[in-house]
Image (cartoon, helix red, strand yellow):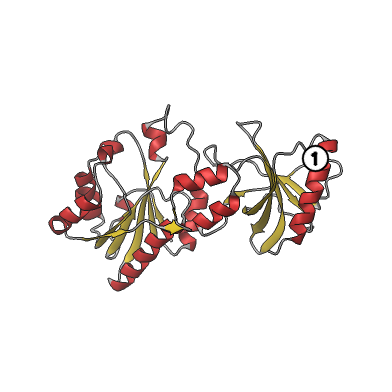
Amino acid sequence: MKIFRSFEEARGLRNPVVTTGSFDGVHIGHKTILGRLKMLASKYEGESVLITFHPHPRKVLYPETAGKELRLINSQEEKIMLLEKAGLDNVIIIGFTREFAKTTSEQFVREFLSGILKARVVVAGFNHHFGFNQEGDYRQLWSMREKYGFEAEEIPEQEVEHETVSSTRIRKAISEGYIQRANAYLDHYYLIMGEPAPFSSPVGLSCRQFYRIPPTDENKLLPSDGIYAVTAEAGNISEKGMVIINKMNISSPDILLCLTESEKDLSGQKTSLLFRKKITGPVNISDPDFSKLKIASAADEISDLIY
């Protein structure tokens, strides 16, 4: 997958089939759009393209209200990895500013989709809006298709067990600790990427390896405090273990990884923690009378899980 940081860098793509959006989570609805992009790109002998934005537009437009407490399912690095896994050909990451936000929907189509990219097809997700004050939508794209020489297509909303899938709904499930529900919406495991650093294991905690994962993105959404069953993947290494989340220190929350069965050293390696199940609620690992029983039972349950 090719990554571009401006529209100009992406000039010259072959018969681009384009969509736009934040794609936070790269969830099952996003994957439906990406699948359609790939099919149309094959049909027209072209390339699939996602235009996305960084920082998230809400962070720029509403820094003291809607954007202030917004936490994202994925860091940018995680999102790029998931988009590549989904088979996307190209991603254009546009720096979102207040000035760019003034771009009208028709200006966006005229200057970027048509003018620079020369889009062959523009695909919009259900109820997608774009441009200044979110004035653009699929109906407008459809009305402009002949004027600017592209085809337009809308993807219907997606449902999992009769619940409409959205990044907002997934964020709620994660923040409340409903990891298995979030995973169903995502169609993949919720993940945290980072580089484990060796950490002193609490007395009595049966970990063969114990690490702290330094937060890599202050806007990353973390699950509610507790113990989670995870798979830790780094290169060819894949080990089961548990993660302890403790957000008491908001500026630098604890993400602690306990590998219960592995002697392999993950120190400093780019590691993906794939969250499978919440085992128990908040624990205080500094209080042996309270924590040992919970953590020991959690370790036993993780050992019994089928990975």
Q: Quadrant of the C terminus?
A: bottom right
Q: Is residue 73 visible?
A: no
Label 1: few (<14), some (14–19) or many (≥20) C-alpha neighbours in 10 Å: some
Residue 72 pos. (x, y %): 49, 43
Residue 17 pos. (x, y %): 30, 62
- The residue type indicated by label 1 comes to Ser
Picture residue at 35% right of the left edge, 65% below the top: 36
Q: Nearer the viewer, residue 289 or 22?
A: 289
Residue 167 pos. (x, y %): 45, 48
Q: Nearer the viewer, residue 166 or 230?
A: 166
Q: Is residue 169 visible?
A: yes
Residue 128 in the image: above or below residue 132: below
Residue 285 in the image: above or below residue 31: above
Badge 1 marks a residue whose secondary structure is helix
The answer to whether residue 298 is left or right of residue 19 is right
Residue position for label 1: 291
Can you tell which quarter of the image residue 241 is in? Answer: bottom right
* Residue farthest top in this picture: 64
Can you tell which quarter of the image residue 152 is in? Answer: bottom left
Residue 196 pos. (x, y %): 68, 47
The answer to whether residue 160 is left or right of residue 33 is right
Residue 306 in the image: above or below residue 50: below
Q: Nearer the viewer, residue 205 or 212?
A: 205
Q: Quadrant of the N terminus?
A: bottom left
Picture residue at 59% right of the left edge, 48% below the top: 178
